[in-house]
Amino acid sequence: MEKVRTPIEVRYQETDQMGVVYHANYLIWFEIGRTKLIEHLGFKYADMESDNVVAPVIDATMSFKKPIRYGEPAYVETWIEQYNGIRTVYAYDVLNEAGDVAVSGTTEHVIVNKDTFRPLSLRKAYPDWHEAYARQVKGE
């Protein structure tokens, strides 16, 4: 399992009245991390979209451990937790400057035809992605 670390700029508008990052913004950070992981593996999500294929979230979880505040350095570490040829579970840790986990979570995705939302097999539609994802889960 290879983790990709992406720096996140904590912007003022992402914080709430308590001065901490508003919880829904972590899902945006997860998406940033997921996109960077895909790029790290040599692919571009935009290429999939040009084929009229998208990867909606079908499940998401988050666990909050420590606050992240405006101006603090933050990072999102992303990896593939599970993959079976159809469903992919990406996992995330949002870290503070000290390397402590502030938020952890997962998002589960499938790929679908953008017009019909019919599920597709990543294994069949994108065999190169399938091979890379399978290697990641095996820890190669």
Image (cartoon, rainbow, N blue to C red):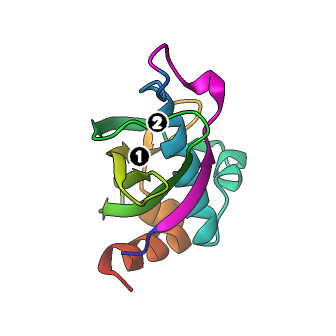
Find residue 15 and report its image quarter: top right
Q: Is residue 28 visible?
A: yes
Is 68 situated left or right of 88 in this image?
Answer: right
Residue 26: numbered disc: 2
Query: What element does badge 2 sit on?
Result: helix
Query: What element does badge 1 sit on?
Result: loop
Q: Is residue 127 above or below residue 25?
A: below
Find residue 79 and report its image quarter: bottom left
Where residue 101 appears, as percent x and y from the top left, is: 34, 52
Q: Is residue 10 above or below residue 24?
A: below
Q: Residue shown at 64%/64% (left/top)?
A: 39
The residue labelled by disc 1 is 110
**Between residues 90 and 78, which one lies in front from this camera angle?**
78
Type of amino acid under label 1: Val
Q: Residue shown at 49%/55% (left/top)?
A: 97
Q: Is residue 121 above or below residue 31?
A: below
Q: How many marks?
A: 2
Is 10 situated left or right of 65 in this image?
Answer: right
Dot 2 and dot 1 residues touching (CB under 8 Å):
no
Looking at the rendering, the stretch of residues picked out in magenta corresponds to: 4-18
Is 52 situated left or right of 122 in this image?
Answer: right
Q: Residues within 10 Å of mark 1 (few under 14, many from 20)?
A: some
Where residue 117 appears, as percent x and y from the top left, is: 48, 32
Quadrant that contains the C terminus: bottom left
Type of amino acid under label 2: Tyr
